[in-house]
Image (cartoon, rainbow, N blue to C red):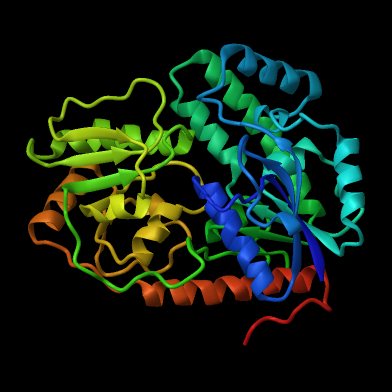
């Protein structure tokens, strides 16, 4: 079976966002069950595809809103309004639908498409109607847009996010209706997208790596809590704002928190123990430097890949319920707390007790096996002659 994996950003071997990590996991699972995969999409400027012989690059794009100039943002907005596309899909209209069709023709005979997330599929809607497809819903995007609108302090942004939510609801409905099968990254997203029937959808228990994580080993603890993320992504930013404004004031002044990753805008905290460290050379070693990992999601859908990575590494954590989307059984060293004061108390107790590291290899192996099983289920819906579900 030969499938085209149509995605906004093709893998370049150095995934820096949860979206890219998820893509690598899904493509890896497809290939493990015997599918020939050709990846089609754009690439970050200055990067090269990780698998050039099986990748078709449509061009280089930088779709980050936080680093874009004002003229660039206005051009994206004008393009979205003019074309009726969402803001995120308008960013990808640097080539025409005809150019995408030509690229598909150049790939040669294929059996179907994996439409990876809304943005690319919506930017070139109709191009992929000539073959059966599987739609991979990374999030319930219209719900995220609604939450972003509610959380925004800017009237302009509220109007923009409300427009996105309306359009995304229509697009997601169409993509789910047309797809032979829908794969989500969290169980609850199936019902939210209206595809809860087992014959129509399944959720993917993702992993964040392609090989076993290391066993527990002594760690050099440099701070009490370490957080890393792409905080410019609005659902992540909502969680960070909740943590800084609602949780941190309940922590003792000597509690040390290090926050890594791109933030954008003006973010600060009066707490003397909070420090923002920007980009770090090794994300895994950074989170291992904290005695406990706060998992602080309060918005969005889909799965939190930082949660999965924390559990794969066996690190102690305190998590909100929203951070555990796609996780049916969190490990014993994860404490769940949703109220700010309880979350702060659990962090301090995790450091003072302290919670011990666990062996995350079993968690990883069970999820990777389940991931391959669910991928094979989707392929069977696409084509009964597809590789069978692993035993």
Q: On the picture, is 155 further left or further right than 308?
A: right
Compare residues 212 and 317 and report the one nearer the observer: 212
* Number of numbered discs: 0
Q: What is the quadrant of the N terminus in the image?
A: bottom right
Between 324 and 370, which is closer to the camera in this rendering? 370
Decide if residue 134 is in sight here: no
> For this view, does 132 lie left or right of residue 151?
right
For the point 34% across and 42% down, the residue is 280
Residue shown at 66%/33% (left/top)?
61
Q: Position of residue 288 (x, y in %)?
A: 26, 56
Q: Kindly indicate the quadrant of the structure image that contains residue 229.
A: top left
Query: In the rendering, at what x and y percent does residue 248 appear?
Result: 20, 36
252 w.r.t. 327: above or below: above
Quadrant position of the C terminus in the picture: bottom right
Q: Residue furthest bottom?
A: 391
Q: Left or right? Give the position of 270 relative to 118.
A: left
Residue 285 picture location, percent across and down: 30, 54
Residue at 47%, 16% in the rendered image: 154
Asked which quadrant contains residue 99, the reply is top right
Relative to 188, is 233 above or below?
above
| x and y, in percent, of residue 128 in the image | 85, 49
Q: Nearer the viewer, residue 227 or 213?
A: 213
Residue drawn at x 61%, y 18% as measured from the top left? 73
Q: Is residue 49 visible?
A: yes
- Quarter of image, res 126: top right
Taking the image as shown, residue 99 lies to the left or right of residue 36, namely: right
């Amino acid at each position: 079976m030969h499938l085209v994996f149509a995605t906004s950003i093709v893998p370049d071997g150095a995934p820096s966002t949860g979206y890219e990590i998820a893509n690598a996991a899904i493509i890896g699972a497809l290939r493990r069950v015997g599918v020939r995969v050709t990846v089609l999409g754009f690439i970050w400027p200055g990067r090269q595809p990780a698998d050039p012989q099986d990748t078709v690059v449509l061009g280089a794009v930088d779709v980050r809103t936080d680093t874009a100039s004002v003229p660039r943002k206005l051009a994206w907005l004008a393009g979205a309004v003019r074309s009726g596309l969402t803001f995120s899909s308008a960013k990808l209209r640097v080539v025409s639908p005809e150019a995408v069709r030509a690229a598909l023709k150049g790939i040669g005979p294929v059996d179907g498409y994996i439409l990876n997330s809304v943005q690319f599929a919506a930017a070139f809607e109709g191009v992929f109607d000539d073959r059966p497809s599987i739609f991979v819903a990374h999030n319930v995007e219209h719900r995220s847009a609604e939450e972003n609108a509610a959380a925004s302090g800017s009237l302009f942004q509220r109007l923009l996010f409300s427009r996105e939510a309306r359009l995304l609801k229509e697009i997601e409905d169409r993509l789910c209706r047309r797809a032979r099968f829908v794969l989500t990254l969290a169980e609850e997203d199936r019902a939210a997208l209206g595809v809860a029937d087992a014959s129509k959808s399944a959720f993917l228990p993702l992993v964040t790596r392609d090989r076993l994580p290391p066993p527990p080993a002594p760690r050099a603890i440099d701070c009490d809590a370490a957080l890393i993320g792409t905080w410019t992504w609005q659902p992540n930013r909502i969680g960070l704002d909740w943590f800084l404004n609602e949780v941190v004031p309940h922590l003792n002044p000597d509690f040390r928190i290090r926050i890594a990753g791109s933030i954008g805008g003006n973010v600060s905290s009066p707490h003397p123990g909070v420090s923002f460290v920007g980009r770090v050379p090794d994300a895994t070693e950074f989170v291992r430097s904290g005695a406990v990992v706060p998992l602080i999601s309060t918005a969005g859908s889909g799965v939190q890949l930082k949660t999965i990575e924390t559990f794969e590494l066996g690190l102690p954590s305190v998590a909100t319920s929203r951070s555990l989307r796609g996780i049916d059984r969190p490990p014993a060293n994860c404490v769940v707390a949703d109220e700010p004061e309880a979350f702060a108390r659990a962090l301090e107790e995790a450091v003072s007790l302290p919670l011990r590291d666990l062996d995350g290899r079993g968690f990883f192996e069970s999820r990777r096996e389940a991931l391959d099983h669910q991928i094979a289920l989707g392929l069977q819906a696409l084509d009964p002659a597809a590789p069978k579900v692993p035993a």
